[in-house]
Image: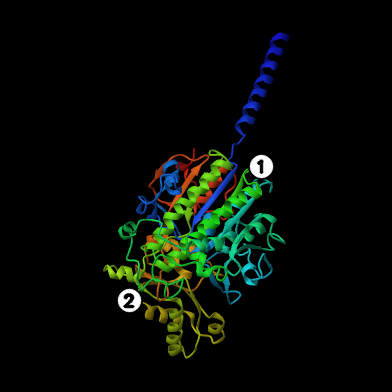
């Protein structure tokens, strides 16, 4: 009997030890050394396919699609479809109603003033004497980012850094707990930061700035990188009165003389594809100098290529300039992947690529081809509506602001005069609905009850934030944009502004494609699942399981 009991006890102990060993093995989680999040500012989804024959076999886009995973029906699911909201959504998995970034700018209903999305007057510029250019931080974002959650999951032993030509493109993705965020100062031609992150630039960044690479790029001028017949095949004519002229009123067509700006005007680089090359060079320098991907915890580099947005706004999606920008960006992203292969190791890093928004065709280009389109600028709208309301209510300036098609009422004046807000809304709505450019006007406080298609209604609800949103939302007819006299813009619900690319590549990613509808909010949820960390605190997105091995 004693032998039997001894055998049973020994067997149970051995089984318990084996189970513990199995459990320990099962909970050992493998992770990539580095995640690189790439946002291409103003990239239409169709650029992946429309320009496919122009992209190189070893370039970035064909490599990401050919070896990675593409979600071909990814949409922005809120309004407005603009840069700050897009970067916030990608990295928080949330929408303006929750994360608080309701536009690049908004009128704050509590403070009664216009706020820039990343402005922070409590901090100072580091690396620049430009003052306002460096008074920036992520404090206006109300929730955590996937980069914050990665820092939390690793007890802050890892590194997270954001870089971009635009401050908002670097700051918002890097999150609250970032080691650093760097953006471009157009006055000095340097990358700068703020005291939110550090007291002075690291030596390696100062050395990078001292190279004055912008002047080297200016020396090259902006020449055609493809054969002339390629532009004629894919694009509108090169000389159009409806395109903007960022390089001077006499600089009408490619090629452009950039040498004239050397040492004088460091802002022009942003409207050229060389800004992408500059940022890619900074990405390599950041990885090497900060030793990203070399520790025992996953690091994160957030890269936002801003140049396509500057080029797109000036010249439009059908321009020679935009085709040339994407042909060059393909090579630039390919160079970044080559560098990651050599330094981090081909199977040791994960990349995702998406866009903060897409972009519309220039209205006059559409009209030239008998397709509906038009313009109605926010500044013009505000003046017209205030003039009309003055006649109806004998009071000027009842509209405080018009931004991103949001109409903000001047509530202090309305309340002090005891005017009826509902009467003002009714009067304005009746007036506006007579406009040929308008499809509908929605009371934002009651957007969930609006008699409009469910897709638009959901985008309005997701974008509404009582503290930072307006009272009425203008829904423009297709092809109508808030823009000046030339160039193009974005910000509306239509697929040309809301249909974005989404590509995953590298460690933990399957090869394949997906046609079911996915959303920008799903990106951070999927990255969280890949890394086995918590989703951001305001995340409403869902994991895309087809992407993951």
Image colouring? rainbow
Closer-to-camera residue (395/530): 530
Q: Position of residue 104 (x, y in %)?
A: 53, 67
User: Left or right: where does residue 319 sit relative to residue 148?
Assistant: left
* The N terminus, quarter of image: top right
Between the residue at mark 2 and the residue at mark 1, the CA separation in whole angstroms equals: 59 Å
Q: Residues within 10 Å of mark 1 (few under 14, many from 20)?
A: few
**Residue for point 47% across, 53% down:** 354
Q: Position of residue 417 (x, y in %)?
A: 54, 87
Q: Choose top left, top right, bottom left or bottom right for residue 27.
A: top right
**Residue for point 66% across, 40% down:** 296
Q: Position of residue 366 (x, y in %)?
A: 31, 68
Q: Position of residue 432 (x, y in %)?
A: 38, 78
User: Left or right: where does residue 392 sit relative to residue 176?
Assistant: left
Residue at mark 2: 436
Q: Give the answer, above or below, for where 339 lies relative to 128.
A: above
Closer-to-camera residue (189/404): 189
User: Left or right: where does residue 217 sit relative to residue 237?
Assistant: right
Residue at mark 1: 295
């Amino acid at each position: 009997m004693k032998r039997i009991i001894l055998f049973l006890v020994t067997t149970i102990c051995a089984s318990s030890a084996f189970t513990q060993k199995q459990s320990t093995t099962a909970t050992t989680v493998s992770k990539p050394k580095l995640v690189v999040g790439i946002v291409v500012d103003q990239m239409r989804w169709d650029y992946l396919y429309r320009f496919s024959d122009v992209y190189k076999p070893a370039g970035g886009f064909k490599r990401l699609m050919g070896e990675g995973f593409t979600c071909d029906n990814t949409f922005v699911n809120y309004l407005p479809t603009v840069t700050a909201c897009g970067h916030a959504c990608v990295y928080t998995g949330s929408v303006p109603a929750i994360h608080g970034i309701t536009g690049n700018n908004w009128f704050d209903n509590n403070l009664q003033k216009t706020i820039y999305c990343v402005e922070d007057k409590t901090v100072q510029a580091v690396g620049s004497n430009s003052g306002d250019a460096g008074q920036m931080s992520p404090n206006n974002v109300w929730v955590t980012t996937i980069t914050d959650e990665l820092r939390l999951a690793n007890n802050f032993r890892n590194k997270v850094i954001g870089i971009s030509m635009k401050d908002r493109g670097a700051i918002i993705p890097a999150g609250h707990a970032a080691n650093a965020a760097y953006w471009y100062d157009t006055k000095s031609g340097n990358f700068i930061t703020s005291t939110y992150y550090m007291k002075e630039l690291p030596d390696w960044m100062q050395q990078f700035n001292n190279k004055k690479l912008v002047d080297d790029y200016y020396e090259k001028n902006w020449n055609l990188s493809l054969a002339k017949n390629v532009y004629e095949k894919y694009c509108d004519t090169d000389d159009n009165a409806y395109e903007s002229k960022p390089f001077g009123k006499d600089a009408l067509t490619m090629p452009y003389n950039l040498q004239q700006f050397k040492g004088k005007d460091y802002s022009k680089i942003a409207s050229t594809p060389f800004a992408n090359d500059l940022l890619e060079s900074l990405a390599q320098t950041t990885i090497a100098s900060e030793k990203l991907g070399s520790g025992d915890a996953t690091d994160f580099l957030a890269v936002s290529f801003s140049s396509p947005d500057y080029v797109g706004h000036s010249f439009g999606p059908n321009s020679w300039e935009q085709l040339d920008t994407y042909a060059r960006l393909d090579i630039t992203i390919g160079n970044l992947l080559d560098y990651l292969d050599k330094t981090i190791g081909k199977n040791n890093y994960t990349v995702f690529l998406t866009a903060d928004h897409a972009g519309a065709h220039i209205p006059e280009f559409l009209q030239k081809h008998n397709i509906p389109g038009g313009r109605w600028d926010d500044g013009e709208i505000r003046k017209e509506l205030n003039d009309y309301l003055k006649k109806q209510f004998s009071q000027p300036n009842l509209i405080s602001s018009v931004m991103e098609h949001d109409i903000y009422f001047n509530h202090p004046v309305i309340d002090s005069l005891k005017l009826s807000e509902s009467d003002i809304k009714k009067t304005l709505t009746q007036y506006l609905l007579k406009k040929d450019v308008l499809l509908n006007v929605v009371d934002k406080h009651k957007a969930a009850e609006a008699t409009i298609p469910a897709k638009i209604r959901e985008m309005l609800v997701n974008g509404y934030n009582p503290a930072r949103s307006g009272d009425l939302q203008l829904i423009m007819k297709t092809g109508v944009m808030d823009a000046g006299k030339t160039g193009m813009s974005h910000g509306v619900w239509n697929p040309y502004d809301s249909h974005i690319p989404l590509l995953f590549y590298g460690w933990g990613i399957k090869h394949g494609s997906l046609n079911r509808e996915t959303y920008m909010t799903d990106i951070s949820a999927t990255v969280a699942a890949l890394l086995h960390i918590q989703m951001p605190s305001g995340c409403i997105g869902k994991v895309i399981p087809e992407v993951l091995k």
